[in-house]
Image (spheres, grey):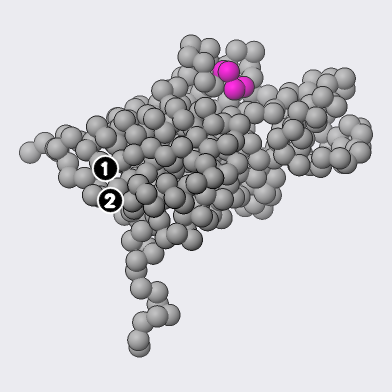
Amino acid sequence: MSEPRLTERPLLTRARIGVLMGGQSAERDVSLRTGAAVHRSLVRRGYNAVTIDVGPMLFRDLRDQKIELVFLALHGPGGEDGSIQGFLETLGVPYTGSGIQASAIGMHKVTTKTLLASAHIPVPGGTVVKRGEEVSRTTAMRAAKLRWPVVVKPASQGSTIGVTIVRKPAQWRDALVLAHRYDVDAMVEAYIPGHEVTVSIIGRQHASPLVLPAVEIVAPGGFYDFSAKYEKGKTQYLCPAPLTAAISRQIRMLALRTYEVLGCEGAARVDFRITPRGRPVVLEINTAPGMTETSLLPMAAAQAEIDYDELTERILESALVRAARHDRPSEEGRTP
């Protein structure tokens, strides 16, 4: 007997779902697109779901809409840095994706790199320049043993916002000013030449996380910036990525290890550079991957024969796992 089609499967929950989107970060527009797509998917499947554009009256909105479970479609600071996760934890409302700690660590690239390096996961070398700190480019680069070109970026931003590839000394100061516009900490790290590849992962309730096929990103000019990410037709995507079997195994292992070291849940995406010599280097992790029509997570899922609606349900499951965990009596509270 064949497996029932997705539309014939029972719903995972009858709870009223709030798709939180928008917010006030620099990635607001992307978040609105993600949230709208997720909401359409949930409604298609028959879930009782509404969208909520996150603002100062979020508590009232959650209460008035009688939200019992949240699907997080927020991107950037405030949405994937542990802030909204902590707010929902306080209210006792289950939500999708990673928890407070993993979200906070994953959003702050300096902390991410420190933890990954301690776990012997290869990351670019670099240093941090704080806003208002008078550090010459020579001092910063010498301290971190860097050579031109370098990458300067805010420590806590996504979608390549505020990022500059600095190829000559004359660009140094402007790159720092741009990065400091978005964060008090500017990361200065080695530019890793080679192919850009990303690996998405989906957590599962009763099995190890599912590692999806890798996607190679061929961006115009070799820089996968904001417009290259979100303007249709501007970037070429190769899925599955044309990698050797050995490199493919290696990045799948490193992606899973990164996911586990940071304590991620639900869906996440690990970005790599593969050097000309075939050495994978982890650039960063995204604990709240986009779900727009050009996003990499749905693309990788489709290659694994997981359509958009099934992907949405698999992410939704992470909120139900969290709810079950919180409802379970603690060992300390049990009578011997």
Camera-side residue of 260 and 335: 335
Examine the rendered structure and indicate whether residue 214 appears above or below residue 209: above
Question: Residue at label 2?
Answer: 15
Camera-side residue of 1 and 98: 98
Side of 149 where 133 appears, left or right: right
Side of 24 where 152 appears, left or right: right
Question: Residue at label 1?
Answer: 48
Q: Which residues are the magenta region?
A: 224-228
Circle 2 packing at 10 Å, graded few (<14), some (14-19), many (20+), is some
Real-space Cα distance between discs 1 and 2? 7 Å
Q: Quadrant of residue 38?
A: top left
**Residue at 27%, 50% in the rendered image:** 15
Callouts 1 and 2 close, C-beta under 8 Å: yes
Side of 184 where 318 appears, left or right: left
Query: Which three-letter amino acid code belongs to the residue tagged 2?
Result: Ala
- Residue 167, given in percent of the width and then of the height, sits at 79, 20
Examine the rendered structure and indicate whether residue 91 appears above or below residue 36: below
**Residue at 65%, 45% in the rendered image:** 108
- Residue 113, given in percent of the width and then of the height, sits at 67, 45
Please state, as top left, top right, bottom left or bottom right, where the N terminus lies in the image.
Answer: top left
- Residue 264, given in percent of the width and then of the height, sits at 49, 50
Q: Earlier in the sequence, mark 1 or mark 2?
A: 2
**Residue at 48%, 47% in the rendered image:** 58
Query: Which three-letter amino acid code belongs to the residue tagged 1?
Result: Asn
Camera-side residue of 1 and 130: 130
Q: Is residue 148 visible?
A: no
